Image (cartoon, grey):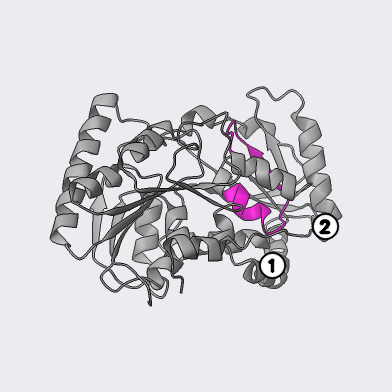
Amino acid sequence: MEGAIPTCWVIDHPAHFQLFSSFIRGGHPDDILVLTSRTEVQIMFRTRDGRIPHRPHLWVERPVGPDIGRFERFRIARRRIKIVRKYLHSNSQIQRIVVKGASLELIAAKRAGISERIYISDTEVNHIAHRIAKRYATEILLPKSWKKEISDSIASDSRVRRYSGILPEVYVDIPAGKSVRKQAISQIREGIQSTSETISDAPVIFHRLIHGGGIHDDSELINYDYWIKDLPVHFVHTKESALESTDAAWEIPTQIAMFDGVLTGSTTLASEAVIQGIPTLLISRAERGFLDDIEHRFPRTLFRWKSLDRDGIDEIFNLWIQSILEQESRIQSIHNNRSELEELIGPIA
């Protein structure tokens, strides 16, 4: 707690809870939370005991979604700024706000007189948030792998500070993942065999389907359902918002290590899997500097398909499955960006 500053932490996505939880534990007792009302965040908040301390909190609407038009999006955004500003005024002890991509709170914080406003991003295509951050943030944190050709305007800002690697390296417990795999992989296979007449040694794949509706991911989605039907693997399927009201949402970054491989359209899940040495196939049109970074750092672990056309994907399928079957010892080159982020927004507990 030494050196902690009373802070408003903004949680707009499940990965934000994962990233900020250790900072909240190590934070100031006067900290507060702003939480977006999306299913996964609500589940994680309900199951927060033992993971983050209880802090005052405010729920806000999410101004994005498949059924929200432009006018409604603007109305929700204005209301969100207004109520967050009022919430900050009512918590006058707050000296700082920290957000990842959720730039609306930066507007509210500046209007509420919060002097320190930190914006974190690893997503070049979130141009609207970047424009807002350039006007309202006092400090901007970007990865060293940022692709300037996608978004150069914010990267060249004088307020930018760089962090190494990818954000999941801050919160994914890699030793715990290895331990979980040793304990669970045989049980997973036994469960699969009990539902089948034949015993299969096919790789067991964790498959996470995202449904879109985000501010930038709709244009990145690829409908690949029919492409994977005949692959010689056994899929364990889950959807982005299909978790039960348990602590499963908190444990996903560790639990994915139980499986032989991962297939997903989620860049976050892909990065969480790759740094644990799990052969991962990401089917998405997403362009990210951090994806290029881990593709270079973890060869034969991250496989990517970016086309809407399936012609040629069979070669990628084969390379991915071969990597799984080899089960080679994959050397992880992990960055110590926990200490970097602790210097920038810490302390951590």
State which quadrant residue 195 falls in. Answer: bottom right
Q: Is residue 254 visible?
A: yes
Observer-nearest of 54 and 326: 54
Where 282 sits versus 55, above or below? Answer: above
Q: Position of residue 329 (x, y in %)?
A: 82, 61
Q: Is residue 171 visible?
A: no
Q: Amino acid at mark 2?
A: Gln
Q: Amino acid at mark 1?
A: Arg
Local secondary structure at mark 1: helix
The residue positioned 69% from the left and 67% from the top of the image is: 181
Indicate left or right for 274 with 78 as reference: right
Q: Position of residue 211 (x, y in %)?
A: 48, 38
Q: Position of residue 277 (x, y in %)?
A: 72, 57
Indicate left or right for 65 with 79 as reference: right
- Is residue 283 inside the magenta stretch? yes
Indicate left or right for 21 with 170 as reference: left
**Mark 2, residue position:** 327
State which quadrant residue 347 falls in. Answer: bottom left
Which range of residues does the magenta coloring cover?
A: 269-288
Count of numbered tags:
2
- Is residue 170 inside the magenta stretch? no
Observer-nearest of 16 and 321: 16
**Mark 1, residue position:** 181
